[in-house]
Amino acid sequence: MRVAVSSADGRGLDARVSAHFGRCPYFTVVDVEDNTIQAVAVVENPHFQDHRPGQVPAFVHDQTANMIVAGGMGGRAIAMFEQLSIQAFTGAHGTVQEALDLALGGHLDVAAPCAGHSGGGGDCEDRAH
């Protein structure tokens, strides 16, 4: 399984989870097999400064991710991930390693739009506990 985690910096597993997947500067992409990390890569989000609906989900899909973990995201993005057969989880916080442990342990919420996020913009800070 390949998991993409929205990341606030490029420190891999030690990076902080970004509150909003679309505006994160990086994704930490983690290959996991039998709940064991096999590989970690950090990729820059090319749509960090400005993105249109669908661009970031398509980018995550291009990374061959099966799962996206983020602090929060809007309903339109959640629907796009569903169409791309990528499981989306929100409510992540702390480091990428901590969020990954929560996701793999079944302790994160299946993606739900964050408060104040009605389709387009919005602030997901309240979702990143």
Image: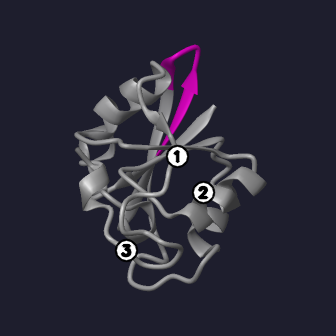
Disc 1 element: loop
Q: Amino acid at mark 3?
A: Gly
What quarter of the picture does the C terminus occupy? top left
How far apart marks 2 and 1 lie (CA) works out to: 7 Å
**What's the amino acid at mark 2?**
Ile
User: Height in image: 74 above or below 107?
Assistant: below
- 50 in magenta: no
The secondary element bearing badge 3 is classed as loop
Range of the magenta residues?
29-37
Looking at the picture, how far across and down is residue 110, in whole percent? 53, 38
Name which quarter of the figure residue 60 lies in.
bottom right
Q: Position of residue 97 (x, y in %)?
A: 32, 32
Q: For residue 32: magenta?
A: yes
How far apart are labels 3 and 1 at the CA level? 16 Å
Up-down relation of residue 68 to residue 21 (above or below)? above
Which kind of residue does numbered mark 1 sit on?
Ala
- Contact flag, marks 2 and 1 (Cβ < 8 Å): yes
54 left or right, relative to 10? right
Relative to 13, 65 lies left or right: right
Residue 9: quarter of image: bottom left
Q: Which residue is mark 3?
A: 122
* Mark 1 crowdedness (10 Å alpha carbons): few <14, some 14-19, many ≥20: many
Which residue shows up at 38% across the image and 83% down it? Answer: 49
Taking 86 as reference, is 76 above or below it?
Answer: below
Name the residue: 67% across, 46% down.
86
Q: CA distance from mark 3 to mark 2?
A: 14 Å
- Whether the residues at callouts 3 and 2 have beta carbons within 8 Å, the answer is no
Instruction: Report the residue marked by disc 1.
Output: 111
Q: Secondary structure at mark 2?
A: helix
Q: Mark 2 sits on what residue?
A: 78
